[in-house]
Amino acid sequence: MSGRPSQKVMFMSLMIDPQKVADINMQLANGNSISFSGHVIEQDAYNLRIRLTSSGMANANGTLNIRYGTQQSIRNLAGNGELDGQPFVLTFKGKMK
């Protein structure tokens, strides 16, 4: 987030319901977690694009682009937007199996 030190993401999970609502959960190196919700706006065999709508009790907007691999593991994620009016940038690279 703008004006704050970078945080290292240790683990990320993604769940999508039949209505294409996505829940994204991240575990940070400091033990805290962050969650986002949004709607799937594009999807194919290896890529997913999500428009963010919220983060817990906070307002969130922006877009996450996710590339996934074998067994639906997250290979990488990149996105940006605003969280309660504060700009943020998010990048994540999963471990290759």
Image (cartoon, rainbow, N blue to C red):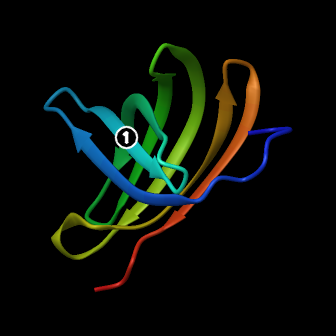
Q: Identify which amino acid the numbered label 1 is placed on.
A: Ile
In the rendering, at what x and y percent does residue 19 appear? 19, 26
Q: In the rendered image of this protein, does residue 71 appear above or below residue 4? A: below
For mark 1, what is the residue?
A: 24
Left or right: residue 8 compared with residue 16:
right
- Pick whichever, 66 or 9, lies toward us: 9
- Quadrant of residue 4 within the rendered picture: top right
The one of 47 and 28 positioned closer to us in this rendering:
28
- Image height of 52 relative to 75, above or below: above
Would you say 73 lies left or right of 8 here?
Answer: left
Please tell me whether mark 1 sits on a helix, a strand or a loop: strand
Q: Residue at x 43, y 34 (%)?
A: 35
How far from the left and from the top, in percent, is residue 88? 71, 40
Question: Furthest-front residue in view?
Answer: 30
Instruction: Give the residue at x 49% y 41%.
Output: 32
x and y percentages locating residue 84 in the rendered image? 67, 18
Picture coordinates of residue 52 (x, y %)? 50, 30
Residue 78 lies in quadrant:
bottom right
Q: Residue at x 16, y 70 (%)?
A: 71
Picture residue at 27% right of the left edge, 67% below the top: 73
